[in-house]
Image (tube, helix red, strand yellow):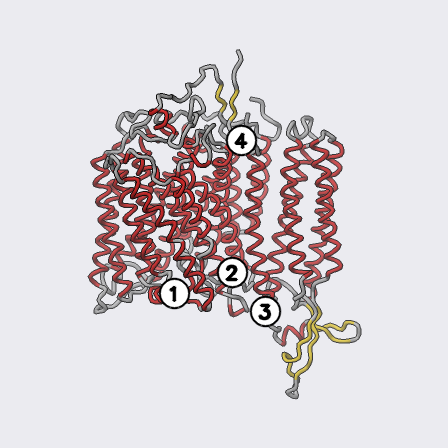
Amino acid sequence: MATAEHHVGHHSVTGIDNRKLLMWIFLGSECLFFGALISTYLIFKADIPAPPISFIEAHTHVENGHEVVTGWFPVDRVIDDVYINEDGTFREVEFAGVLDIPITSQSTFVLLMSSVTMVLAVYGAQHGRLLSMKVWLLATILLGLIFLGYQVYEFRLFGSEGLTLETNQFGASFFVLTGFHGTHVFVGVLILASLLLASFRRSGLGPEAGFHVETAGLYWHFVDIVWIVIFTIIYLIPA
Amino acid sequence: MATVAGTMAAPTAEGVVWSWLTTVDHKRIGVLYGVSAFIFFLIGGVEALLIRAQLAVPNGGVIDPELYNQLFTMHALTMIFLAVMPLGAAFFNFMIPLMIGARDVAFPRLNALSYWIFLAGGLVLTSSFFLGGAPDTGWFAYAPISGGTYSGSGMDYYVIGLLILGLSSLAAALNFAVTIINMRAPGLTMMRMPIFVWMTLIVAFLLILALPVLTVALVQLLFDRQFTTSFFLPSGGGDPILWQHLFWIFGHPEVYILILPAMGIVSEVLPTFSRKPLFGYAAMVFAGVAIGFLGWAVWSHHMFTTGLGAVPRVVFATSTMIIGVPTGIKIFNWLSTMWGGSIRFTTAMYFSVSFIALFTIGGISGVMHASPPVDQQQQDTYFIVAHLHYVLVGGAIVGIFSGLYYWWPKMTGRFLSETLGKWNFWLMFIGLNMTFFPMHFLGVAGMPRRIYTYDEGLGWEFWNMFASVGALILAVGVLVFVINVARTMRQPKTAGDNPWDGSTLEWATSSPPPEHDFDAIPEVRARDPLWYDRDHGLSQPEGDPDEHIHMPPPSYYPLILALGVLMLGVGPLSHLAVTALGVPVIIYAIWGWVLEPTE
C-alpha cells in the first residue's frame, strides 16, 4: 500500500528549515541581550569616580620604581586632587589601568581562529568528509577552551589587582558583560562537544550532519562577532 | 518504535493524567494555558477585591499595610504575567495552527516546554506569599526600594519568577514566529493572513526583542541583591535611573504585547458578526506593524518626572502622540467594518463593540499624559490607574472574553449560553466602568496610587466606595462566566464546523478539531478563504483516506526540562545545592530531547 506520508514540522514556506530560522531569530534576541549589557558598560564607563582613600592605600604597588594604584580604572590615569596628605596638600596619584591589551589580543586571535576551524568543520560535514569534520570540531572546541582559559586568567589577574564585582561600576559591568559572553562560549563548547560525541555513534550525526553542524556554527560565529564588538568597545576605544 | 540508547521510551499515553502531562498537541497545550491562566486571573481578581475592600472607606483596616503593599504588587504581576499574557498564549496555541492551515506548531515539544516553564514561574511567584512574603515594591520594582536594604526575600521571588517566565515567553515567541513564517497553508500569503495571526506575529517579535532587556535588568538586580554590586544603588555609585530605562524599554513594548492579541481577536469577531470583510485590511496590518515599531520609541514617557531634560521630553512626548495615529486607524477601521454590515449581536459581538469604546477611553487618556506637564500632574495618581485599567481590562480582558465566546464552539463543539453571556457582559461592562471611571476623578482630586488608606474629608470617600461596589459587580460578572462554562460542558456538542459563518480556516475543520487538525491541508485562494469558496462554489480539498497523517508522539522531556529549570531557579531561593542538582537534570533532558525519535 502506497501511503503518502505527511510529517508535521517539515513544512517550510520560505524554504529555510524551521530549526535554522529559529536559530536566526534567537540570535536577533541575543543582540538585544548583549546590547543591554554593553549599554550598561558604556553608561558607567564614561563616569567612574575616583576611589576612596582606603582603596588607594590598600592597592598601592611599586612598579618600575614608582608608586601606582591598581584595580580601579580600565586604563592608565593620573589624578591630583583625591589624596590629601597630612599637611593638607594634595598628592598626585598614578593609576595603572587593569586592561592588558596584548594578552586579550592573543585570546581574541584564538577565538577568531576558532571561527575558521568552525567553517572547516561545516565544510567537512556538508561534503561527507566525516574525519575532517571531527578533527575541525575538536580544534574549535579546543580553541574555545583556550579562550575561556585566557578569560579565567584575566579575571583572576584583575581580582589580584583589586578589581572585583564589588569594587566599582566598571568592575560590575565588566565582569557581568564578559562573564555572560564567556558563558555563551562555554555553552557553544558544550554544543560542539555534544555533536562531536554523537558523531562517534554508529549512525553518526545521521543524514542531516551538515545541517546540524551548520546551525551550531551559526551560534558559534555569532558569539565570536559579539566578542569583536566587546573587544573593540572595552579594549580598543580609549576611555 | 525502537528506542535510542539513553532515551526513555516515548510515553504511550494510556492514563488521562499522563496524556496531559506529556502532550505536545497545540490544542491541548492551549487548553492547559487557558485553564491555568484563568485560575491565576481569579487569584489576581481576589487580590484586587482585597485592595478595593481596604480602600472602600477612609481609614480602613481590612488588611495590614505590609500585606497591602504585597497585594498591589502581586495583583499587577499576576494579571500581567500570569493571566493576560498566558490567556493570549492560550489563543495563540489553540488558534494559530488552525488559522494558518497547519497540523501543529513548528516545534511541538518546545511548545509544551513553554507551558511547563510558565507554570513553574507562576508557582514560584505566587508561592512567595507563603514563604516569607510576596514582592512589595510595585510591579516595576524601582531602585533603590528593590535593593536588599529596603525589601525582603519577596524581591528574590520577583527576580527568579520573572526570569523563569521570560524564558517561557521567549520559547513560545520563537516557536510562533517560525510557525507563522514557515507553516502557512498553500496560498496563504502574508497579506492574506487573518489579522489575529498578524498581531500574534508582531507580539512574538516584540517578546523576542524586549524580553532580553528585562532579563539583563533582572540579572543586574539579582547581582545587586546577592553579590553586592551597585548597578542601581546610588549609595555604591550606581544609577537608579538605569533600572527605569531598562525596565521600560521592556515595559512599553510589553503594553503592546498585552493589547495586540485582543486587537487581533476583535478584528476577527467584528467582520464575522457584521457579515462583511474587515475594512482596510492592509491599513490594519501596517498600523499593527507601526505600533510594533513605535512601541520601542516611547518608553521614557514613563519617566517624565525623573528630570530627563528638555530634548528627551520633547522627543518622547512627540513619539507618544504619534503612536496614537496607528491606534486611531485601527479604531476607525473597526467602526467602518460594522458600517453598513448585517450585524448580529451575539455576546462575542457585545464584547468586541464595547472593546472599541473602552479602549478608546483608555487610549485618549493615554494621549493626555503624553504631554509632560500634564503627566507631571497625573504621575502616581489614580488617573494613571484609571488609564491603565481601561486599556488592560476594558481592552485586553474584554477582547479576551470576546474571543472566548467566539471560539468556544470551535474549541469544545459546544455553545456558551447566550443568555448567561449577556448577563456576563452587562455585569462586567457596568462593573468595570463603575470601578475605573471614578478613578479619573479621584486622580484629578489628588489621590495618589498605592496608598494604604486615606483620611476623611478629602472628598475621596464617595468615589472610592462607588469603585469598590463596581469591583464587586465586575467579580459577579466573572462568576457568571464560570457558571456559564460549567453548564455548557454538560450540553451536547451541537456547534457544527462553522456555526458563525466565519471566513477563516479554523472554521473549515470540525468542532472540536481532530488531533491532526485538518484531514487535508486547506487551500487558500483569497483573503477571506471560506467566504471566497462559498461565493464561488468552491470547496476545500477532501482528506485522502489512504494518507497516513503522522503526528508527533507525546514526550516526557518538556516536563523534565521544565523541572530542571525550576530547580535552577529555586536554588537561589532556598539552597544552592538545588541549582547544582538542576544542572544534570537539564543536561539529561536536553540529550534525551535531541535523541528522542519524533518520526
Residue A170: percent from left, percent from top: 61, 64
Residue matched to label 1: B372
Classify mark 1: helix, strand or loop.
helix
Q: Residue at x 46, y 36 (%)?
A: B190
Residue at mark 2 to residue at mark 4: CA–CA distance: 46 Å
Q: Amino acid at mark 2?
A: Arg
Is label 2 in contact with label 4 (beta carbons under 8 Å)?
no
Q: How would you rate the neighbour count of disc 1 (Cα within 10 Å): few for under 14, some for 14-19, many for 20 or more?
A: many
Q: Amino acid at mark 3?
A: Asp
Residue matched to label 2: B225
In the image, residue B171 above or below residue B320: above
Classify mark 4: helix, strand or loop.
loop
Is residue B407 toward the left or the right of residue B587 in the image?
A: left
Classify mark 2: helix, strand or loop.
helix
Is label 3 in contact with label 1 (beta carbons under 8 Å)?
no
Q: Residue furthest right?
A: A64
Residue at mark 4 to residue at mark 1: CA–CA distance: 48 Å
Q: Residue at x 49, y 29 (%)?
A: B554
Residue matched to label 4: A12
To which chain does the residue with label 3 belong?
A: A
Q: Residue furthest bottom?
A: A87
Asked if marks 2 and 1 fall on the same chain, the answer is yes
Q: How would you rate the neighbour count of disc 2 (Cα within 10 Å): few for under 14, some for 14-19, many for 20 or more?
A: many
In the image, residue A97 above or below residue B591: below
Query: Nearer the N terminus, badge 4 or badge 3?
Result: 4
Is residue B210 toward the left or the right of residue A200 in the image?
A: left
Residue at mark 2 to residue at mark 3: CA–CA distance: 23 Å
Q: Amino acid at mark 1?
A: Pro
Res B347 → quadrant: top left
Q: How would you rate the neighbour count of disc 4 (Cα within 10 Å): few for under 14, some for 14-19, many for 20 or more?
A: some
User: In the rendered view of the protein, which quadrant contains the N terminus of chain B?
Assistant: top right
Q: How would you rate the neighbour count of disc 3 (Cα within 10 Å): few for under 14, some for 14-19, many for 20 or more?
A: few
